[in-house]
């Protein structure tokens, strides 16, 4: 099977084959590609990123590790439903083990426009 | 105000410039028009940044944050946000005029680096006929509204152009509850990276219509639909025009470099990148004036942008000290399969190697990229594929470099 490694913008074209019961990946420029190829045919996962409204602006967030693809919209909903705190910093965990996965949701950016003087 | 190096633009390119100029002993002023550093990265909330630089898969804002921390407390770097550069002139030094909430700022600098990035081509740049209703956005502008302000732009969306920003926005809008009817691309292949086609369109079953374009828009107050038609032999076939109901149209039709600020200088221009030609130090044909990042060429990889910044920053610091070695200049020549090279000029100097990047005229598979100097081959690299659009990086070992340099692409001979 041919697929595209999505781990970085190089977009290597991977060939994923079953040889003697083992999954063999070729076409990858780096070891991440092999990891991705095997994962994609056994248990596809995605890193999910989103935005959440907070007081006076927004925060951007992501999953710390890739989560099962089928949980995509559950994770997005959990992010929107998470309670709003007073302050946020980059790296803060806003949800632990989101939707029962081993991934946390962390803050990647805080967007609060400065007040005009 | 006086400084050795002035960097204009506080995106990833500008931040790396400032860092590296300071590392090389220069005093630096970094000027950014927004209220904070980060540039376009602040709105690129998706992941895929920094794999090669930090060996981690970060989102855009995190990548910017890392760099910001590297330069924020550096005593040699003065950061001026909310400051817009309006004019650059030169005597022996450069004189730069900027405005900010306090008034006009005058800065005198020994060298200047332009790191102002790109702006999007607007609707006016493509002949879109019809009314002018609300609901038509450039993709990057939509990205800023959705990601920074947290506001939605519409419910039923058509995207024209399959560039990366368009693909990424297709996914973002679906995640925010909109319906993306389809992405329309005038070319016969996807404009964005294959990875973005996979994870932004395929994952969400969003159709990509190749060799198809939007011919007109419909609606008075708000957009109510667009007309799409296929291209037959490069010509729009109006007989097959079809109305597609939607309330929003995103345009992802390319970027142009922010080069107008220095149009008063007589710089050598590149027709292909619509920017200026540079040498190995990323110096333009005006001594002491440097480029870095997307203003020089549109990059897919922010890591390469940071890399540019480090080269330009170091070079600008050396120039300010009068130590930039430009004695033996060589123009890089190439065959017609290579569209342009950056840099255009390299030097026989103490640097052991030089990074040369280029784009090709079409897709190539199983080729050798070769470099010849004085009829002697000095490099031969095997490449499995280069797609057109993709930037190829050649790390040239300069030890055997002579008076000239020629780059070419050779097909690998396959023995049957
Ligand atoms: C939608 C999108 C998705 C991308 N995805 C990826 C990805 O997944 N992985 C990856 O590695 N790369 C990605 N990239 C590429 C990468 O983000 C860019 O190449 C990089 O950010 C360009 O950096 P820059 O510093 O040259 O420009 P910019 O980030 O645009 O910074 C230019 C700065 O200059 C300032 N400026 C302009 N004019 C003036 C003036 N006159 N005075 C003062 N300041 C001024 C602007 O305000 C801006 O802050 C993506 C890019 C886009 C647009
Ligand atoms: S294999 Fe490595 S280099 Fe190629 S796309 Fe995947 S992560 Fe990038």
Image: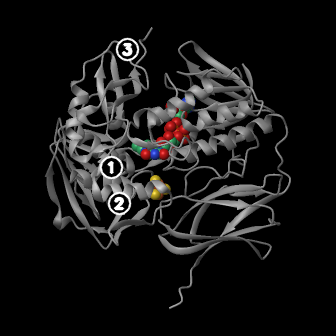
- Name the quadrant of the C terminus of chain A: top left
Residue at 31% across, 51% down: B199
Q: Residues within 10 Å of mark 2 (few under 14, many from 20)?
A: many
Q: Secondary structure at mark 2?
A: loop
Point out the tag, 2 or 1, that comes first from the N-terminus: 1
Residues tagged 2 and 1 counted as in contact (Cβ below 8 A): yes
Q: Residue farthest to the front?
A: A20
Measured Cα–Cα span from mark 3 to mark 2: 41 Å
For residue A38, what is the image quadrant?
bottom left
- Name the quadrant of the N terminus of chain A: bottom left
Q: Are marks 3 and 2 on the same chain?
A: no
Q: State the mark number for residue A75.
A: none
Q: Residues within 10 Å of mark 3 (few under 14, many from 20)?
A: few
Q: Is residue B401 left or right of residue B84?
A: right
Residue for badge 3: A87
Q: Callout 1: residue from which chain?
A: B
Q: State the mark number for residue B167.
A: 1
Is residue B117 something that shows in the picture? no
Asked if the beta carbon under badge 2 is closer than 8 A to the nearest atom of ligand 1, the reply is no
Residue at 66% across, 37% down: B113
Q: Is residue B52 above or below residue B320?
A: below
Where residue B304 appears, x then y in whole percent? 57, 48
Q: Secondary structure at mark 1?
A: helix
Measured Cα–Cα span from mark 2 to mark 1: 10 Å
Q: Callout 2: residue from which chain?
A: B
Measured Cα–Cα span from mark 1 to mark 3: 32 Å
Q: State the mark number for residue B190.
A: 2
Q: Are marks 1 and 3 on the same chain?
A: no
């Amino acid at each position: 099977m041919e697929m595209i490694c999505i781990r970085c913008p190089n977009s290597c074209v991977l060939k994923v084959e079953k040889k003697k019961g083992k999954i063999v990946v070729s076409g990858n420029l780096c070891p991440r590609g092999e990891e991705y190829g095997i994962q994609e045919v056994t248990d596809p996962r995605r890193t999910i990123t989103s935005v959440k409204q907070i007081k006076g602006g927004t925060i951007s967030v992501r999953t710390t590790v890739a989560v099962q693809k089928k949980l995509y919209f559950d994770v997005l909903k959990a992010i929107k439903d998470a309670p709003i705190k007073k302050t946020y910093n980059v790296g803060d965990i806003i949800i632990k083990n989101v939707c029962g996965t081993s991934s946390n949701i962390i803050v990647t950016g805080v967007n609060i426009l400065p007040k005009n003087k | 105000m006086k400084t050795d190096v002035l960097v204009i633009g506080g995106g990833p390119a500008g931040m790396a410039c400032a860092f590296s100029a300071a590392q090389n002993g220069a005093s630096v002023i970094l000027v950014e028009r927004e209220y904070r550093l980060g540039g376009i990265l602040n709105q690129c909330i998706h992941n895929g940044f920094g794999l090669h630089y930090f060996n981690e898969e970060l989102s855009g804002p995190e990548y910017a944050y890392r760099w910001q921390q590297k330069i924020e407390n550096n005593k040699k770097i003065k950061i001026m946000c909310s400051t817009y550069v309006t004019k650059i002139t030169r005597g022996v030094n450069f004189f730069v005029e900027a405005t900010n909430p306090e008034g006009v700022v005058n800065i005198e600098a020994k060298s200047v680096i332009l790191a102002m990035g790109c702006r999007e081509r607007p609707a006016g740049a493509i002949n879109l006929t019809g009314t002018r209703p609300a609901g038509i956005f450039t993709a990057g502008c939509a990205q800023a509204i959705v990601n920074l302000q947290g506001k939605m732009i519409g419910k039923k969306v058509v995207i024209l152009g399959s560039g990366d920003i368009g693909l990424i926005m297709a996914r973002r809008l679906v995640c925010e509850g909109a319906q993306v009817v389809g992405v329309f691309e005038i070319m016969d292949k996807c404009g964005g990276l294959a990875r973005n086609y996979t994870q932004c369109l395929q994952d969400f079953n969003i159709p990509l219509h190749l060799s198809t374009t939007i011919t007109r828009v419909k609606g008075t107050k708000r957009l109510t639909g667009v007309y799409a038609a296929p291209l037959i032999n490069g010509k729009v076939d109006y007989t097959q025009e079809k109305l597609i109901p939607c309330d929003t149209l995103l345009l992802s039709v390319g970027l142009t470099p922010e080069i107008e600020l220095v149009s008063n200088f007589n710089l050598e221009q590149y027709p292909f990148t619509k920017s200026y030609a540079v040498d190995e130090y990323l110096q333009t044909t005006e001594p002491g004036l440097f480029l870095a990042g997307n203003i020089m060429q549109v990059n897919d990889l922010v890591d390469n942008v940071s890399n540019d910044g480090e080269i330009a920053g170091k070079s600008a610091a050396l120039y300010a000290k009068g130590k930039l070695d430009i004695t033996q200049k060589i123009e890089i020549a190439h065959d017609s399969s290579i569209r342009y090279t950056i840099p255009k000029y390299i030097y026989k100097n103490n640097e052991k190697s030089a990074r040369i990047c280029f784009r090709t005229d079409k897709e190539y598979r199983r080729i050798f990229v070769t470099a010849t100097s004085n009829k002697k081959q000095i490099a031969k690299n095997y490449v499995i594929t280069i797609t057109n659009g993709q930037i190829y990086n050649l790390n040239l070992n300069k030890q055997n470099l002579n008076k000239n340099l020629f780059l070419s692409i050779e097909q690998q001979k396959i023995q049957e």
